[in-house]
Image: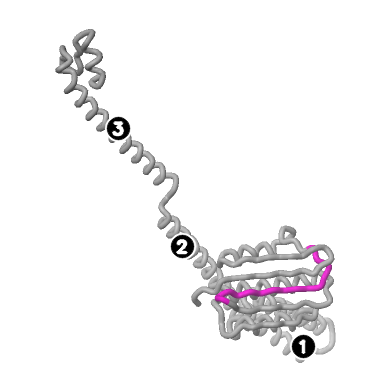
């Protein structure tokens, strides 16, 4: 209205917010005021739009620093969970080794002594049978303890533990390991159980004649591969073993890749960054 005052005043007096304009001479100052008001309004609208855009970005797109901090905290918490899980695993292993296993050893010794004291007859037969069952239970418990956390891995590291797995495998296994020194405990544990699960699957399901285990460290990354010449067709979705290993490896920022076409060969490959010990 202020800007249009010179044109409007030719027909009639103009009253704008209590300001009465009767002549063209009075209208031109109103034009200047109108231009100033228009500029102020445009500036305020621009400032309001900028504030709304900034608020939208804040709500929908957190700053990069906050995202980086959130990712870092998430990784730290995942590593902490893995470490806590391994600590609990070792506690259970110690309890079984120092408790139940020692009592079973004492039981087998007592039954063995009883066999020497008894004469031939039904009682001796029962004690002999009990002795054999106790020894079987002891062997099963020892296998369970090794499966929970093998002592050779704790004492001598990943290379020695893989060699032990290869020696126990019913399928011949060639090893090619380039591992100088110890690795972080969580990395060694994940790699050990990967090799253990893979060799178990080779023996049970693949029909392979031989297998190979390769492991090396390069550019701060551990790579472990298990290869067999079996029938192939391995699918992590069909069993919990490899799927559980994939979750364990993912928790320490590693990756698990499985290539197993029908007819073989099967390649199981783990890559994992080596963080601080």
Of callouts 3 and 2, the N-terminal one:
3
Residue depicted at x 74% and y 59% = 238
Q: Can you identify the residue that label 1 sits on?
A: 115
Q: Which mark is residue 72?
A: 2
- Which corner quadrant holds the N terminus? top left
**Residue neighbourhood size for the residue with mark 1, other residues' Cα within 10 Å, grouped as few (<14), some (14–19), many (≥20):** some
In depth, the one of 217 and 195 nearer the eye is 217
Q: Can residue 268 be seen in this view?
A: yes
x, y (%) of residue 137?
A: 72, 77
According to the image, what is the colour scheme of the structure? one colour
**In the image, is residue 37 above or below residue 273?**
above
- For mark 1, give the secondary structure: helix
Q: Residue 42 carries which label?
A: 3
x, y (%) of residue 273?
A: 56, 71
Of callouts 2 and 1, the N-terminal one:
2
**Which quarter of the picture shows residue 188?**
bottom right
- For mark 3, give the secondary structure: helix
Residue depicted at x 49% and y 67% = 80
**In the image, is residue 13 above or below residue 117?**
above
- For mark 2, give the secondary structure: helix
Residue depicted at x 59% and y 71% = 272
- Marks 2 and 1, how far apart in space? 63 Å
Range of the magenta residues? 219-233
In depth, the one of 101 and 60 nearer the eye is 60
């Amino acid at each position: 209205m202020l800007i249009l005052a010179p044109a409007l005043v030719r027909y009639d007096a103009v009253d704008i917010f209590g300001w009465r304009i009767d002549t063209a001479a009075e209208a031109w100052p109103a034009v200047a005021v109108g231009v100033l008001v228009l500029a102020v309004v445009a500036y305020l609208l621009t400032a309001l739009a900028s504030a709304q855009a900034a608020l939208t970005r804040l709500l929908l797109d957190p700053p990069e620093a906050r995202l980086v901090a959130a990712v870092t905290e998430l990784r730290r918490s995942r590593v902490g969970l893995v470490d806590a899980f391994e600590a609990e695993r070792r506690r259970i292993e110690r309890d079984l080794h120092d408790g139940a296993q020692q009592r079973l050893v004492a039981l087998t010794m007592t039954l063995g002594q009883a066999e020497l004291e008894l004469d031939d007859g039904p009682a001796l037969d029962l004690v002999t049978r009990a002795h054999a069952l106790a020894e079987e239970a002891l062997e099963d418990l020892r296998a369970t303890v090794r499966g929970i956390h093998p002592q050779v891995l704790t004492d001598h590291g990943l290379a020695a533990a893989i060699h032990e797995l290869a020696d126990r495998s019913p399928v011949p296994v060639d090893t090619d390991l380039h591992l100088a020194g110890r690795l972080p405990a969580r990395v060694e544990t994940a790699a050990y159980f990967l090799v253990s699960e893979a060799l178990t699957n080779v023996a049970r399901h693949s029909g392979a004649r031989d297998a190979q285990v390769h492991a090396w460290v390069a550019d701060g990354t551990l790579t472990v591969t298990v290869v067999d010449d079996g029938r192939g067709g391995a699918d992590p979705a069909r069993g919990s073993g490899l799927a559980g290993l994939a979750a364990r490896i993912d928790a320490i920022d590693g990756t698990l890749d499985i290539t197993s076409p029908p007819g073989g060969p099967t390649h199981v490959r783990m890559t994992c960054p080596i963080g601080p010990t």
